[in-house]
Image (cartoon, rainbow, N blue to C red):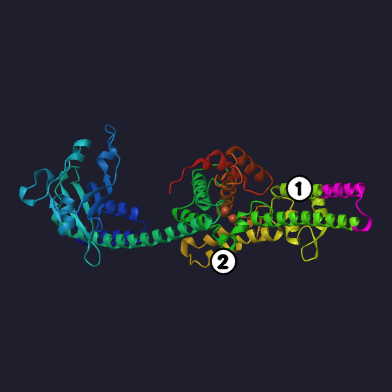
Amino acid sequence: MYHSQDIKKRFEALNKIGIALSGETHLGRLLELTVKEARYFTNTDAGSLYLVDHDKNCLNFEVAQNDSLKKRADLKSETFKPYSLPLKKNSIAGYVAVTGEMLNIADVYNLSPEVGFEFNRDFDIRNKYRTKSMLLVAMKDTEGKIIGVLQLINSTNSQGKVVSFNANVESLISSLASQAAVAIKNAQLLKEIKDVFEALVRYSVSAIDARSPFTAGHSRRVAKHTMALARAINDTHEGPYADISFSPAQLEELNYAAWLHDIGKIGVREWVLDKQAHLSDAETDVLISRFENIKASAITETQEKRLELFHNRGESATEIKQLDSELKARINQIDEKLAFIKKINTSNLLTDSDINHLEEIYKKKYVDLEGEERNYLTDFEFENLSVRRGNLTENEIEEIQSHVTYTENIVNNIPFTGHLKRVPVFAAGHHEMLDGSGYTKHIKAENIPIQTRIITISDIYEALTAKDRPYKKSMDPIKSLAILKEEARNGKLDKELVRIFIEKKVYETQESN
Ligand SMILES: [Fe+2]
Ligand SMILES: [Fe+2]
């Protein structure tokens, strides 16, 4: 297309390429685009791009494009594998990367021995390809530092014959390389910042998850399920979400929201997160020693009565026997009460009769060592022990639920802008249910975005199947999926998303990051 010698037209084209390059901020796509545009500009069969790694003193082969090999059905061309070359003048690309000189070679198989570099024919032999003409240009950033090498291979004329590169494309390719270098440098900087931020999010979230052995690794796995479900929706071309396709930018936004959804757990006290029984071990020890004291005071009381009997009326065998059996019965009762408390302490479901029995024990009085009359159980113990379902009191449930509010506050304070703007909304809504029965805002379906619904399903599935909860066995996937289905039937979860989650086996996706 650009065989015309009209320099003005070529510069216009170059200008367009410059605009296209500066509009691409994703490093991988930018590198591909650079090679594609340069090849289009010079009409070449193939092209590659190397980036210089100054820290490791090497050249990384990043992009390979080759039209002939792509078209050939007779030969399975090798898949591109990134590799590194030493940053030395003995290879063609290395020479350009070290010296910054442009090379315009008519035939790489006929290099003069004086040039000091060689062409490696391995690729040609393996793929039955013939590399002939080559144009290589160093890509320099604004400070003149060489950041990469653009390599164009086999310039072809209008008849499709491989020819040498015309000298008058050299300056144009050189300009293109400079423009690409600026865009690449910016994309690299952007990637570095993103990588640092992403690592910071992942490490801090993982550290917060690891405060409780029950949630270690939770957010990582929720993000994994979330991304797999979002990709499965992209691949779904039927049903209500047939037309939904998340762009890479939207996927990035969703990924951050999934990673950050429980960051607010930092605001919940550790022992509440970790609560495994109605009373902790230390609280149970206090209770047990009180019951020992109650027994001891029953014994003392009996002995006092015995002394009194002795002083008043002398020893009477029947009365003493009576006292002894009363004492025995009292001690048995106290032991039974303690055994009952120990039993319900680890129970997650109490009956009415359990509660009644507990209340009787709570109200029973004893006299402590200071002579004060007290209840068998403290108010705190009674409140905690009498929780019917699970072991969290209302205040503790409220505290745990408040993690969503903390998440919203924390994530709102991270200046997410542009395509990441809705991270706080997606993250903070993950306990809302479609029928409004969730928390903390009790919003309903129409106000719950699909991204939040995806995180909610992933979150529930992960919590059910988590293997790292020491006090409970992980639930097997079949049962957990049945619960998701049930919740969808009850109008709490999005039916279509649950269907995709199950049918596309999203839950089986292995971690990719
Ligand atoms: Fe949560
Ligand atoms: Fe969660």
Image coordinates for residue 290, horizontal then vertical, percent: 73, 57
Q: Nearer the viewer, residue 83 or 128?
A: 83
Asked if residue 442 can be seen in this view, the reply is no
Q: Residue at x 65, y 61 (%)?
A: 399
Judging depth in this view, the residue of 193 and 504 nearest the camera is 193
Local packing at callout 1 (Cα closer than 10 Å; few below 14, some 14-19, many 20+) is: some
The residue depicted at 26 percent of the width and 39 percent of the height is 69
Looking at the picture, which amino acid does disc 1 mark? Phe
Q: Nearer the viewer, residue 112 or 290?
A: 290
Magenta part of the chain: 311-330
Neighbours of disc 2 within 10 Å: few (<14), some (14-19), many (20+): some
Confirm whether residue 214 shows in the render. Answer: yes
- Labelled pair 2, 1 in contact (Cβ < 8 Å): no
Indicate the position of residue 45 as horizontal and vertical percent values.
23, 45
Q: Residue furthest top?
A: 74
Q: Nearer the viewer, mark 2 or mark 1?
A: 1
Residue ID for mark 1: 340
190 to the left or right of 401 = left
Q: Earlier in the sequence, mark 2 or mark 1?
A: 1
Mark 1 secondary-structure assignment? helix
- Residue drawn 58% across and 39% down? 477
User: Which corner quadrant of the image does residue 194 belong to?
Assistant: bottom left
Q: SS of the residue at dot 2?
A: helix
Residue that appears at 63% across and 54% down: 275
Left of 270 or right of it: where is 300? right
Magenta stretch: includes residue 263: no
Instruction: Please identify the dominant SS of the magenta region.
Output: helix
Residue 229, image x, y percentages:
52, 46
Residue type at mark 2: give it: Asn
Q: Which residue is mark 2?
A: 409
Q: Vertically, is 76 above or below 431?
A: above
